[in-house]
Amino acid sequence: MDERLERNKRFVAEFYDIIINQKDYERAKPYMGPRYRQHNPLVKDYPDGLRDFIEFLKTNAPQARSKIIRSFAEGDYVILHVHSWRRPDTRGRAIIEIFRLNEDGLIDEHWDVIQEIPETSANPNGMF
Amino acid sequence: MDERLERNKRFVAEFYDIIINQKDYERAKPYMGPRYRQHNPLVKDYPDGLRDFIEFLKTNAPQARSKIIRSFAEGDYVILHVHSWRRPDTRGRAIIEIFRLNEDGLIDEHWDVIQEIPETSANPNGMF
């Protein structure tokens, strides 16, 4: 695997941990490009939108945790397959995140898809 | 980009179109490995599980359509970011699909995350 792709995966995984688990906007800020275009319909554009989201988490879901199960990279994109909990002792949610990095290697655009893990399944494999 | 990765992306995109848009199990079958391990909680394991899912679509959502917006590949994995409609004239759903190919280049495992596109958004960018 290309070293730049491995670097991008590590960089995005660090950023993700800082946002979701550490909930530390000041540490997350240097990872972002100035535009940080947002596609999650609950979050505003620009780095400031992410600051508001982290404040939301700290107030409404201080125990929120996420675990990256697998990650992929191609070109300027990094994809994370994530198990996420807003509260402990819940089944949690399956999330796939897509991040695009800009020409400076900073995170500049974000998409995600989020699904609650259902209680029952037609197969024995789990969502991961 | 590695030729094998481009081949894998084309192969998975063809398979996906055959399943969701053409809804043709007999044409989809040669794309799958014998195990076809399923992680979508509504679908059973093995190629037979996908047959049942296609029958479900033909009966309950005959107008279901999906459009691949972007795709990525790394190693044995292909990732599709998809706009999916069960019925026309709806906002539809955002889906990210992950497929793993086996040593013969056949599709052998599948994960997805599915989210209804909400009516309103905190940003003007849409979910894609």
Image (cartoon, coloured by chain):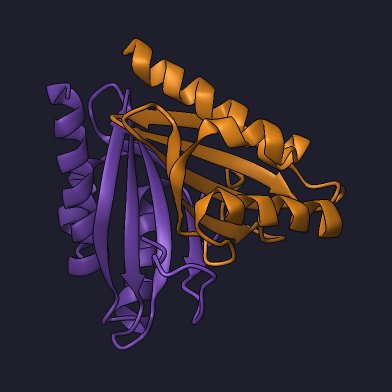
Chain colours: A purple, B orange
Q: Residue furthest front?
A: B34
Residue B92 coordinates in the image, percent (x, y):
73, 52
Residue B65 coordinates in the image, percent (x, y):
76, 41
Q: Is residue A126 visible?
A: yes
Residue A59 coordinates in the image, percent (x, y):
34, 82
Indicate whether B45 appears above or below B27: below
Please state if B107 lies on the left or on the right of A28 as rendered. Answer: right
Q: Is residue A38 visible?
A: no
Please state if A110 lies on the left or on the right of A113 as rendered. Answer: left
Please state if A80 lies on the left or on the right of B44 as rendered. Answer: left
Q: Residue placed at 15% from the left, 55% from the top?
A: A27
Q: Residue placed at 21% from the left, 68% from the top?
A: A21
Task: Say which quadrant the N terminus of chain B sits in.
Answer: top left
Considering depth in this image, is A52 or A68 the residue closer to the camera?
A68
Considering depth in this image, is A19 or B123 the residue closer to the camera?
A19
Q: What is the number of callouts on the image?
A: 0
Quarter-of-image position of residue A64: bottom left
Task: Say which quadrant the C terminus of chain B sits in.
Answer: top right
Q: Residue placed at 17% from the left, 21% from the top?
A: A2
Indicate whether A93 appears above or below A88: above
Q: Residue placed at 53% from the left, 40% from the top?
A: B81
Indicate whether B84 appears above or below B7: below
Considering depth in this image, is B58 or B1 the residue closer to the camera?
B58
Indicate whether A5 appears above or below A43: above
Quarter-of-image position of residue A92: bottom left
Residue B37 coordinates in the image, percent (x, y):
43, 53
